[in-house]
Amino acid sequence: MLTANQIMEINRIIQIGRLLLDEHDRYSYSFDASFGTYLPDAVVQTKHVEELAKLVKFANQEGIPIYPRGQSTSLSGGPLPVQGGIVIDLSVMNDILDIDEEDLVAVVSPGVLTSAIHKAAEEKGLMYPPDPSSSHVSTIGGNMAENSGGPRGLKYGVTKDYVIGLEVITPEGEIIQTGGRTVKNVTGYDLTKLIVGSEGTLGIITKAILRLIPKPPATATLMAIFSNLVDAGRAISNILSSGILPSKMELMDQASIIAVENYQPMGLPRDAEAIILLELDGHPLALQDEIIQAEQLCYVVGASQVKIPKNDMEKEEIWRARKLVSPAIVRIKPTKISEDATVPRSKIPEMCERLQEIKRRYQVHLVLFGHAGDGNLHPNIICDKSDPEEMERVEKAVAEIFTAAVELGGTLSGEHGIGNMKAPFMEMELGAVGLDMMKRIKKAWDPNNIMNPGKIFPEPGQKLELK
Amino acid sequence: MLTANQIMEINRIIQIGRLLLDEHDRYSYSFDASFGTYLPDAVVQTKHVEELAKLVKFANQEGIPIYPRGQSTSLSGGPLPVQGGIVIDLSVMNDILDIDEEDLVAVVSPGVLTSAIHKAAEEKGLMYPPDPSSSHVSTIGGNMAENSGGPRGLKYGVTKDYVIGLEVITPEGEIIQTGGRTVKNVTGYDLTKLIVGSEGTLGIITKAILRLIPKPPATATLMAIFSNLVDAGRAISNILSSGILPSKMELMDQASIIAVENYQPMGLPRDAEAIILLELDGHPLALQDEIIQAEQLCYVVGASQVKIPKNDMEKEEIWRARKLVSPAIVRIKPTKISEDATVPRSKIPEMCERLQEIKRRYQVHLVLFGHAGDGNLHPNIICDKSDPEEMERVEKAVAEIFTAAVELGGTLSGEHGIGNMKAPFMEMELGAVGLDMMKRIKKAWDPNNIMNPGKIFPEPGQKLELK
């Protein structure tokens, strides 16, 4: 709880922006797209970096928790104010979106929507590759905090690979610049890549410089249907080892196919065990050749059907199937737990088996889809959080999904982040010393633990809770 | 100086590897490809990670400096044992070089030569993109310590972009694993990308997992000759904004051209102000089209001649011109100071002007070449370190090159690292707070300052010394 004196001082600091104290206002900032509701003591909206820095300086002196927040699409609890304190609504800091065609960079404010960056870059013949599925509703600031991925990660990498410079307010309220406008920079430690993906625990990003690339002149799409999930896995391997690097390579399992067909019938075969959706991008002459190669590689391993759309409308229709998975599955039951456990590519078939086993053992409604090309699967469990008996089974199933991923040499999280949700599993993946090396950085930068406290690092005895 | 007891204990720890104490042996470890000679107290060669970890633990207790070293091709003093102590010769740790075609990764020991990784990957139809010019003589461990770049950085990025997992001995002698075999991993702070490029100040890399990509099926080369340096700059901009992303885009200035012609006449025009060398890679059909486009773009801005080699032999002949620059210029005078100040792409013409001004003002023999496509120029000053009057002018010229790069929004170092050489200039680029945030990480990880002390962070009053 903030004291009356603290509130008076915050009011004095926030001259240009707004301070929200009403319970109604604060309630809107108490949740994200994951679990739990935590009411902050105050919310600050400001576009003014210096005034925000002053606020952080004050919060650091007083030990008040600071929770930076974008559009709160986080699936792992990134922006949840789990210890009260002040939420910083960075969605209002959205003034700057400059595309520099000569330097091939974009300079952006953290509150800009990622899709707006896509659009601005494309208008100049350029591309900002990272494409989290939430890009139409999520901010670049949130994408940077969580190091978001997306389908194009396979060919182009993730958010971190495109952030080359930052303006950051440190946990002690100082404003620093990291990196710059050059792709090559080895001047000291790479603070840019340390801060991107640190989930707001090391500072507040107030501006970023993003690397852009020339937009590939053409794309080609392919949909391949398999009666057998293992054959689909082999098709993925064979295409990648043939020298073709697709821009996207998505997988839908039978449960996803049936969910989509029940929601909006698109003529997908309900008896198929898997569908692969593939996009290539590049020079049109190269694509003409490669898409035929990819088609043949699918048939060789036993695809029952391969579709190559002939025009943009047909392409969109095919990608719509993948996009409908999420809305389709929440029709089954109201609660969707979207995981992003990621395994080495060669372990995808084994991970699929482990997931089916978990589904059977705990009798949960598990749907599997995701970015198969880079091993970043999205096992989704569909459930009802008002049913405590079911949720207990779900909690156990989720814990086993994490264990399976780590045992197969993978990771707890490929692109959604740790937040408060996966914190209890950190030591399983990193070991005690590995986790301690991370904590030392946190402590050195944020000695009073005010920046997004309660995230990434597990509290003693903390357990997974889905409610 | 090590005490007799310390030497006895080190001898006890190093059972499998070798401890070198002879002055003759130690002398071979006292220099690198930069400046200065510093005799270490001892040299350890071991392939055994656990015994090396024990040694580090002991060194940490006793406060003995540890200097990891690969093949010592560093141009910034990375492996120099500037405070004595123990040099760890990691070139002997070279057993592992496994290419996994399914996961598209290579697992390597730090002592493996980078060119051996290129070769092993290519044999399986894959590619490890980073290609520092020293790759035939430098180790992957050194490349990781310095985050090496190379010509292909323009399209493919630098070493850091391909390191996804590490085994590291911490400064306190613990063995940790960071990252893993998946490209997507957001489980906690990105220690992998923090350690890569930290110049051996945060630990010793004893194993690495590198991401590979399918090898592009074809390449195409172009050489364009310009009577005017500014036109060459415009050609670079126009090609990049046309949507073509070359794999390499190299620049040679008139001084480089003349040096090569004096060394091994290749028929390059001595009156040309600049030559651009360009390589495209990808699908052969795409290249046929793009190389013609690139040729036209060069002619449009005033190239006097454009050559497109027809076969591999002709291609090699063209790239030989670029490779001869370094050996050619050291024939002029014995000492070569190779800088790697990097500027945003749009500032290349201005940087070229600033460099010509510096050349005139200090009457130094400055030769300019490098990776123009990503702003990573290599101004080289050719001098004679036995001439103190000349070296004084050279020191001033180098300091001004750094200043110019930072003033133009660039960086001190694009790919060679800071080492001891550029440490005095860190605060100019990073500011006091930025530098302090780096120091905090160093202190949190290495409280006794034993890992490569004297590097990156300037000592009070430290100045550039070239002798």
Image (cartoon, coloured by chain):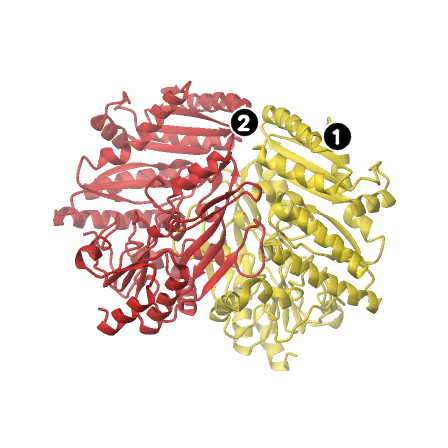
Chain colours: A red, B yellow
Residue B307 — which label?
1
Q: Where residue B257 sits in the image (x, y, percent)?
A: 80, 43
Depth check: give the residue in front, A157 or B360. B360
Secondary element at tag 1: strand
Chain on which label 1 sits: B
Residue under pointer 2: A283
* Quadrant location, the N terminus of chain B: bottom right
Residue B97 — which label?
none
Outermost residue, front side: A16
Vertical position of residue B29 compared to residue A45: above or below: below
Distance between mark 2 and mark 1 Cα atoms: 23 Å
Write the residue at 72% across / 54% down: B355
Vertical position of residue B391 compared to residue B62: above or below: above
Secondary element at tag 2: loop
Depth check: give the residue in front, A97 or A81. A97
* Residue A432 visible from this viewpoint: no
Q: Where residue B209 sits in the image (x, y, percent)?
A: 51, 49
Q: Amino acid at mark 1?
A: Lys
Classed neighbour count for the residue bearing mark 1: other residues with Cα under 10 Å, few (<14), some (14–19), many (≥20): some
**Location of residue B301 by image quarter:** top right
Q: Are marks 2 and 1 on the same chain?
A: no
Write the residue at 19% across / 59% down: A22
Vertical position of residue A122 compared to residue B397: above or below: above
**Location of residue A249 by image quarter:** top left
